[in-house]
Amino acid sequence: MNDAEIRKVLGLLSQDDTVRAFAALVLGDATGLPPKVLDRLAAGGLAGRDADGRWRARPERFRELLRAHAEPQPELSAEERVLRTFLVDGRLTTMGMRRDKRLVVLRYVARVFEPGVRYPEKDVNVALRAFHDDYAALRRYLVDEGLLSREGNVYWRSGGPVDV
């Protein structure tokens, strides 16, 4: 499919007689429609005859044109798929997930902490609250998995990927 086909369909829909005929077909009433107009709609892929020989609208033509010109979706990595599943608008939807998926999410969350910087527990809680209301469980998971370390009430990043 090319741009000429899109222009043809848009041209048909910009004409009063063809848009009225298309609307009538969508509503299921093809009585009294001029054959010349129906032939123009058929040439543009917007109408066709069914098995009984009756004219019917082909609104699926719009989907065909959109699909033909749509940008292909990039392949997502397994990690990106997990993040899209459990993060909505940057917040965790649930904490109950398998360990392998939880590790993907925890590595993502750990990136909010700069390597080499020490954070008081209060600052850690504020940062983690942005991801989930149960920030204490999230903090505990990060420490248990070795992504954060703690001494007293001071935390620092000790694992996970580092953005360069």
Image (cartoon, grey):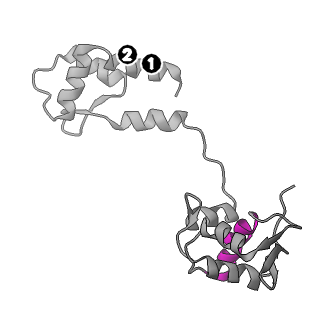
Q: Say whether residue 67 is magenta.
A: no
The residue lying at 36 percent from left, 28 percent from top is: 45
Query: Residue 11: which disc?
Result: 2
Q: Nearer the viewer, residue 80 or 17?
A: 80
The 10 Å Cα crowd at callout 2, few under 14, some 14 to 19, many 20 or more, is: few
Residue 145 shown left or right of residue 128 in the figure: right
Q: What span is colored magenta in the figure?
A: 98-111
Q: Nearer the viewer, residue 3 or 107?
A: 107
Q: Are marks 1 and 2 in contact (CB under 8 Å)?
A: yes
Q: Cα distance, mark 1 to mark 2?
A: 6 Å
Relative to 126, is 150 on the left or the right?
right
Residue 129 coordinates in the image, percent (x, y): 60, 69
Q: Amino acid at mark 2?
A: Gly
- Identify the secondary structure beneath mark 2: helix
Identified at 56% across, 81% down, the residue is 96
**Displayed quadrant of residue 106:** bottom right
Q: Main secondary structure of the magenta part?
A: helix
Label 1 belongs to which residue?
7
* Total numbered labels placed on residues in the image: 2
**Residue 153, visible in the rendered structure:** yes
> Percent from the top left, x then y, of residue 72?
60, 43
| Image height of 58 relative to 74, above or below | above
Q: Amino acid at mark 1?
A: Arg
Q: Where is residue 29 drawn, in percent x and y?
A: 13, 31
